[in-house]
Each structure stands twice: as structure tokens, then as C-alpha cells.
């Protein structure tokens, strides 16, 4: 969902001043994106990914896995709240504005966010050079993997391999099993 037009583009400061009303606010190219609370399957999909990614990221010592809400800047006036993301390090200040760009960003599609996740956010993440952006499509039971140079996603429905720099071994996710766990069948 997009907020009504304002007389001027939204700024990071304007978004951070909004009330804590249960919605998630993101800012891309001056446009405010507002999303309501996610569905049960959406949250279960994230929890299952957390359970797989967390131990891997920790064991491989490649950084930190973090969930939203987060007010990542990604440079300039952007303000992003990815569902899950991996950063290579934590800034001493622990202030969101000082966090390094993520190695991986994951968004689980929702009806209200699908267009922005696939187009506006994806383009911004690619422009910023985010090494991997995964779009989890629960209905299609697939994950779209985007890299900075991609013109089309790699659509994965069997196995997902992630081999980030610095890792001794790749992460492998059996996607049919993952989606069965999300949907309970």
C-alpha cells in the first residue's frame, strides 16, 4: 500500500517521525510504502528460514542474521525494512543508519507488497549492489534469486544453494520440504 501523495517527496526523517501504529513504513526514492501486519504463513516462512539461516551464518562466521523491523538506510534517503537480512558486521553505534549493506535480503511476498518487492525494492537493491535478494513466493512455492547484474531472476523450486564470500561451505535448502513445512502439507 502506498501513502497518499505529499507536496514533496518523503524523507527518512519524516518516516522515522511517524507514530508506532503497528504498520511497517519503508521509503524508496521518496515514496512511502506502508504495509500491515503479515499473515501467519508469511511469518512461518520467515521463522523456518531463520531456523536454517541463523545456525549457518553463525557457524560460517559471515555476519549477523537480523529480522525486521529495521530502518536500514541503504544509502541516501532510502529506508528499508527487509523481512530478513544478513549483514557482514555490526556497527559500534548499533544505529540503523550506520549498518553496512546486507549480504542477503529476503522478502516473503504478500498481496499488498508483491509489486514493490519485485520491482521498486528489487531495482534499488540491485543498484545498491546487494549480492543476493531472495523473493519467497509462497503461492508459487518458489524463491526468486536476484543478483545485481540480473535482468531476470533465477527461479528456484527444488534446491537453493547460497555460497557467500568467506563461507567454507554452501548453505543448501530443500525447497519442496521447506514449502511443505510452511503450508503443513
Image (cartoon, rainbow, N blue to C red):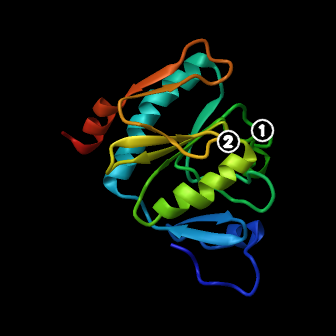
Rendered position, 54 above or below 132: above
Q: Secondary structure at mark 2?
A: loop
Identify the residue at horizontal 57%, vertical 25% (top origin).
57
Q: Is residue 13 left or right of residue 146?
A: right
Residue lying at 43% horizontally and 41% vertically, measured from the top left: 143
Res. 88 image quadrant: top right
- Furthest residue in direction bottom, as rendered: 7
> Which mark is nearer the camera, 2 or 1?
2
**Residue 85 horizontal/vertical position (percent):** 59, 41
Tag 2–tag 1 contact (CB < 8 Å): no
Instruction: Please name the residue shown 65% across and 54% down the image.
Output: 123
Q: Position of residue 185 (x, y in %)?
A: 18, 39
Q: CA distance from mark 2 to mark 1?
A: 24 Å
Q: Position of residue 150 (x, y in %)?
A: 62, 42
Instruction: For mark 1, give the secondary structure.
Output: loop
Q: Using the image, determine if residue 101 lies above or below residue 71.
A: above
Q: In percent of the image, x 44 and y 66: which residue is there? A: 112
Instruction: Say if 184 sits above or below 74 in the image.
Output: above
Q: Earlier in the sequence, mark 2 or mark 1?
A: 1
Q: Residues within 10 Å of mark 2 (few under 14, many from 20)?
A: some
Q: Is residue 167 left or right of residue 174?
A: right
Q: Which residue is mark 2?
A: 148
Quadrant of the image occupied by residue 104: top right
Q: Residues within 10 Å of mark 1 (few under 14, many from 20)?
A: few
**Disc number placed over residue 91 in the picture, else none:** 1
Most foreground residue, 155 or 102: 155
Amino acid at each position: 500500500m502506498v501513502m497518499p501523495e505529499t507536496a514533496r517527496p518523503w524523507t527518512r526523517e519524516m518516516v522515522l517521525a511517524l507514530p508506532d501504529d503497528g504498520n511497517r513504513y519503508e521509503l524508496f526514492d521518496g515514496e512511502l510504502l506502508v504495509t500491515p501486519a503479515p499473515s501467519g504463513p508469511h511469518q512461518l516462512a520467515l521463522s523456518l528460514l531463520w531456523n536454517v539461516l541463523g545456525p549457518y551464518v553463525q557457524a560460517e562466521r559471515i555476519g549477523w542474521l537480523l529480522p525486521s523491523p529495521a530502518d536500514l538506510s541503504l544509502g541516501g534517503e532510502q529506508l528499508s525494512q527487509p523481512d530478513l537480512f544478513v549483514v557482514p558486521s555490526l556497527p559500534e553505534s548499533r544505529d540503523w543508519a550506520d549498518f553496512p549493506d546486507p549480504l542477503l535480503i529476503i522478502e516473503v511476498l504478500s498481496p499488498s507488497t508483491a509489486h514493490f518487492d519485485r520491482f521498486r525494492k528489487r531495482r534499488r537493491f540491485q543498484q545498491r549492489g546487494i549480492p543476493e535478494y531472495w523473493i519467497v513466493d509462497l503461492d508459487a512455492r518458489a524463491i526468486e534469486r536476484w543478483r545485481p547484474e540480473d535482468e531476470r531472476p533465477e527461479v528456484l523450486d527444488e534446491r537453493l544453494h547460497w555460497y557467500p564470500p568467506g563461507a567454507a561451505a554452501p548453505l543448501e535448502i530443500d525447497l519442496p520440504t521447506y514449502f511443505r513445512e510452511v503450508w503443513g502439507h
